[in-house]
Image: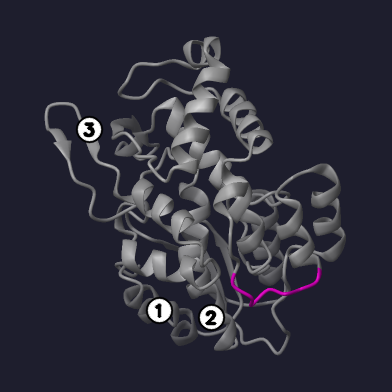
Amino acid sequence: MRKSSRKSVKVSSRERRYADCRNGLGIEAICWMLVRKERKRKVHSLIDKVWNWKNLNEAWKKVKKNKGAAGIDKVTIDEFERNLERNLNEIQRLLRQDKYEPMPVNRIYIPKSDGKQRPLGIPIIRDRVVQQALKNVIEPIFEAEFLDSSYGYRAERSAKQAIEQIEAVRDEGHEWVLDADIKAFFDMVNHEKLMDAIAERISDGRVLRLIRAFLKADIMEQGLGLRENVIGTPQGGVISPLLANIYLHYFDERMAELGYEVVRYADDCVPRSCTRDEGLAPRSLLAGAGFKPP
């Protein structure tokens, strides 16, 4: 890891934020606020943008495109679409009345390349639509804050670009790196710390309650029944990758403040290092965020 005198560069350029407004990718008022670079201002009155009919329809289209299995209610994408207008109307009504309650997620396991299993939490289709509608609204707010060092789960950013950045640093002659994969990251996210981070930028209490409700949604696991979710954000949720990046943005910022440069793809990070001791610098930051350091 090498210390850098360069300032951290924000990914979202002014041109891209203008394009987002023109293309309807996000809520216009938020986009214009970001274009004006009012990044540290808390955002109010967002819930009406979440339940906006156009936003709900756009959210549905994305959920349909991504396909996926049914949740615990067994309602498939096709079945949801057969009564689409009624379903979206019901979502809108519940959101407007501040009565929306997520259903439990269905916990399943898929095999990993190392022989272990990865837990996924599958929400019902209705919850996926609401999560996507919520993501459409809040993502531009946080995207404007994320640093250039973050590559995972972001538009126009890829694992290939992260690898190319690491290779560029290697070619500069740096001999030491720390390849860190945070153990069980999604399952160990602290709800209160995450909500504190979100509340730094969002002051709409109804939006905050909705996010918390998705975090706290019960988990249905075969053979174990229903259990309360007190920690973590389930992989499989539409909004989980964004929440993960919000949570780890603290890590990115702190490393930048200390003068280090890091390449991070979701919960995998490679601090650019000159010496072995400098390569161990992120351990205390990860521990402070509630994770087991590598």
In the image, taking residue 198 as reference, residue 231 lies left or right, namely: left
According to the picture, the residue beneath numbered tag 3 turns out to be 220
| Separation (CA) of disc 1 from disc 3 | 33 Å
- Count the marks: 3
How far is mark 1 from mark 2, CA to CA?
8 Å
Q: Earlier in the sequence, mark 3 or mark 2?
A: 3
| Of pointers 1 and 2, the one earlier in the residue sequence | 2
Whether 124 is drawn above or below 96: the answer is above
Report x, y in % for residue 173: 68, 77
Q: Amino acid at mark 2?
A: Met
For label 2, the residue is 255
Q: What residue span does the magenta drawing correspond to?
A: 36-42
Residue 122: percent from the left, percent from the top?
Answer: 37, 32
Q: Are marks 1 and 2 in contact (CB under 8 Å)?
A: yes
Whole-angstrom CA distance, mark 3 to mark 2, is 38 Å
| Residue 40 drawn in magenta | yes
Going 42% across and 37% down the picture, which residue do you hit? Answer: 236
Q: Residues within 10 Å of mark 1 (few under 14, many from 20)?
A: some
Q: Secondary structure at mark 1?
A: helix
Q: Is residue 53 left or right of residue 88?
A: right
Q: Position of residue 150 (x, y in %)?
A: 61, 63
Is 99 a magenta residue?
Answer: no
Q: Classify mark 3: residues with Cα within 10 Å, few (<14), some (14-19) or many (20+).
A: many
Residue at the image point whose x is 74% and y is 57% from the top: 29
Mark 1 and mark 3 lie on one chain; the one further toward the N terminus is: 3
Q: Residue at x 46, y 48 (%)?
A: 240
Foreground of the two, 66 or 275: 66
Q: Quadrant of the N terminus?
A: bottom right
The residue that mark 1 highlights is 285
Image quarter of residue 272: bottom right
